[in-house]
Image (cartoon, grey):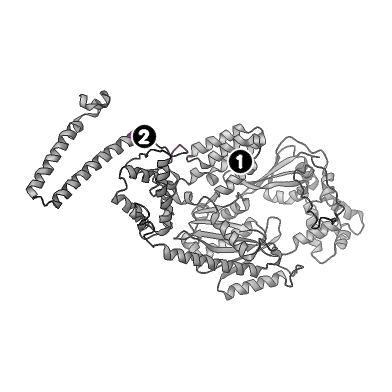
Amino acid sequence: MTSTLIPIPQNAEFWCDRLFHLTAPVVLTGEEFDTYWPLVSTVYTKLNGSKIQRNGEVTVQRYECRLRKSKKGGKPPPPKDPGSVKKRYGTTVRQPGLCQVRIKVTRTIEMPITVTVERLDAEEHLHDLARSREIAPSVLAIQVAAAEALKGYQPAQVMNTLKGVGTPQGSERLIAIGGAHMTRKHVQNAVARRVHRVDDRIPLNRATTLRQEIDDAISFLGEKGWLHEEFTVLDAEGAPRWGLCFAHPTRIQALKRRGYFTQFDSTNKTTTWGHNVFSFLVRNEQGIWIPGTHCVVEGENPEILALAMKTFKKWCGWEPRYVLTGEDSAVEQLAVRRAFPGPEGGEQAVEHLLCSVHTMRTLDTRFKSAADKQILNALRKALYALTRNRCLDLCREAIYLAQDEVTKNIIRTSWLDTTRKWAMYARSHSPLLQQIMSTNGVDTWHRELEARAGLGNVDATIHGIKDMILDIMQQAECRDSTAQKALNDFRVNGYFIGNCEYPEVGLFPRPVQKLLRPEVDGVMDRIVQGKEAPVFDQDLTCHCKFSRQYLLPCRHIFHLDSRTKVLTKDRWQTYVALFADRGFEVYETMGHALPPVESEERPEVESVRARSSLRLRQLRERLTQQLHAVHDMMEANHVVEAERRETVDNWMGLVHKVVEPLADVLPEDIVRHNGRPWEL
C-alpha cells in the first residue's frame, strides 16, 4: 500500500544529488523541474521576490541555503504590563552562517519552458543533503502527507500509514523522498496550507463558513445590479486559488473609454480570510481617478490575476495601451503578459510601466550604505535622464562603480536591462506618461478604502467579504460624487480674471487654470532671483518639465512675455483649442512635438540661431505695432484718406531705405566681414 501512496520519481537519487551540489548549471524542462525540484526545494529559502529580466523573457528567483540564515528573526513583543513576565516557548534558534551557498533559478516565460538552476558564486555546501532534510522535510513528502490527511485521517494515522505500519519498505520510500524526519506537526501544518479555501472552515471569531460568506457576497452583488464572476484556478504548485471579479455597469464603461492608461495594485489582508483586493483605476475626462473594476483573490499569483483581467476584457472590451503598477512584481508583469499577449495574440502590445516613487524607494533601500552612495546617485540620475543614451551611460557607470560582481549583476539585470519600464526617457514621447509617473491614484483609493473599513485601527479579522464589498461600494459612490462635482465645475470660467494680467487663462477649464496659476506666479520668483528672461525659437519651445507634461505656456514663456509680447492672440487660441470640446483625454493620443534634450536641466540660453531669430521677430513686431498705432491715431483724428496714404507711404519709404540695403547683402559678404554689413 505504501508504494502507491509514495510515488518516487525516476532517477530521484541522481537528480537530488545533482540539484544539491550544482557543480555545473542544470538545465531542465518545465515538467522535469516540477518533478524533481520538490525533492530539494526545502534545502533553500527565497531571497526577495522573483524578478522578470531579459526584456520580459525570463523570471529569476534567487535562493540561499537554509543554513546560511541571512534573514533576521522578529523580536518577541514586550509585555503589556511592566511588572508582568511573558512566558516564552521552549524554542531553539539555529546559528546563522553555517553555509554560504546561494543559487538562482531562471525560468523562461514563453513556451517551451526551460529552467536553469545554477550557483551565484563558488561556495559549496558545508553539510550533506540529510542535514537539510533534518531541518525541513522535502516538499514532495509534505504533499504526499497532505493528500492523505485530506481524506479525513488524523496526523498520527497519516504518519503510521506512510511508514507502512512499521514495515521497512514503508520507511525506505519515505526516506527516499526526503521525509525521514517528518513529524505529525509537519502533517498538521501541511493540511492547513493545502486545504481547499472554499470549504466549510469557520474562523474562531465568525459564525459563518467561507462558502456561506461567498454566497452571501455574490447574492449581494446581484441585488445591487453589479457584474460579478467567481472562478478558481490552480497555481504553480497545484493548489486551488479562489477569486471573485465584480464591477458596476456604469464605472466599467469608464474603463472601456479611458482604459488607454490604467493603474492597478492590491491592498493586502482586507478580510478575515486574508484576501487581497485588486482595484483597476482610470483617469476620466476631468482628471478624476475612477475605480473601474475590482477583484478579490486568494493570494497573488499570475494565473488568477490574468484570468481576472481577461474577465474585465470580456465584459467591456478593455484595451489598455499602458499599465502602471507600483513595485516591480513578477506576478503582476506575468499576469499582464498572459492577459494581453500582444501581436502574437492578434492584439495591440501593452507596455508595463513602474511607479517612479516606488522605483526611487527601491533604490534607496538597495543602495543605502555609504559605500554605495555613488551608485545610488548615478541610478537616480538615470531615472530622470531624458535620453536613452544618457540613461544607459549612467547605468553602465553604476556598474563600473560597483565593488563586487554580485552588485554588478544586480544592476545589469534589474536596472540596465529594464530601463524602458522605469526610466523617464521611455515616457518622453507622451505628455500623458510624463503627467502620471506614480501610482498615487490607486494608492489614494486604497488608503480611503482602508480608512472607511477601519482597517488602520481595527483588526481585519472582523471584516468579512460582504463587508469589504460594501466598503468598496460606498467609497465608489463618494468618488462618483467627486467626479460629478468636477464635471459641473470643469467649464466654469473666470477663475483667473482679476487675479492676473492674463484674462485668456479664464478660457481654459478650471483644472487647467489651476495648473497655470503657479506658472504665472512663478515669473515674479524668477525676477526676484535675478534670472534673465529666456529666449526660444519661433515655436516657443520650452523643455521644462511643465511644458513637456502639458504643452502649455510655462513660467519661462510667461517671463519672456513680460519683456516682449510673444503670447499673441493666435497663440492663446491654439492653446485654448486643445480643450475646446475635450478634457484631459486629449493627452492620450497627443505625441510630443518637442525633441528630447540631452541636458537634464532646461537651458536658460538657447542657441545663437534662436536668439537672433527672436530679436529679429521682436523688431518686426515693434514696427508692426508702430504702424497700427499710426493708423489708429489718424482714424481718431479723422485724417482724410489722401493724407493718411501720404503719411504711411513716407514712413514705409523710410523703413525700406533702412532695411533694403541690409536685405540685399549676400550671406557670404556678411560672414566675410564679421557680420558688419554697414562697413561694406
Total residue callouts: 2
Q: Amino acid at mark 2?
A: Ser
For the C terminus, give its image quadrant.
Answer: top left
Left or right: 227 in relation to 126: left
Q: Position of residue 268 (x, y in %)?
A: 65, 58
Q: Nearer the viewer, residue 566 or 133?
A: 566
Q: Name the chief secondary structure element in magenta.
A: loop
Q: Would you identify the image quadrant in which residue 539 lies?
A: top left
Q: Position of residue 280 (x, y in %)?
A: 55, 60
- Crowding at mark 1 (Cα within 10 Å: few <14, some 14-19, many 20+): some
Q: Is residue 131 visible?
A: yes
Q: Which residues are magenta?
A: 596-609
Q: Amino acid at mark 1?
A: Thr
Q: Which mark is residue 607?
A: 2
Left or right: 567 in relation to 632: right
Q: Would you identify the image quadrant in which residue 450 lies?
A: bottom right
Q: Position of residue 360 (x, y in %)?
A: 58, 45
Q: Secondary structure at mark 2?
A: loop
- Crowding at mark 2 (Cα within 10 Å: few <14, some 14-19, many 20+): few
Q: Residue 608: within the magenta? A: yes
Q: Which mark is residue 413?
A: 1
Q: Position of residue 573 (x, y in %)?
A: 31, 53
Q: Earlier in the sequence, mark 1 or mark 2?
A: 1
Q: Residue 547: within the magenta? A: no
Q: Nearer the viewer, residue 92 or 257?
A: 92
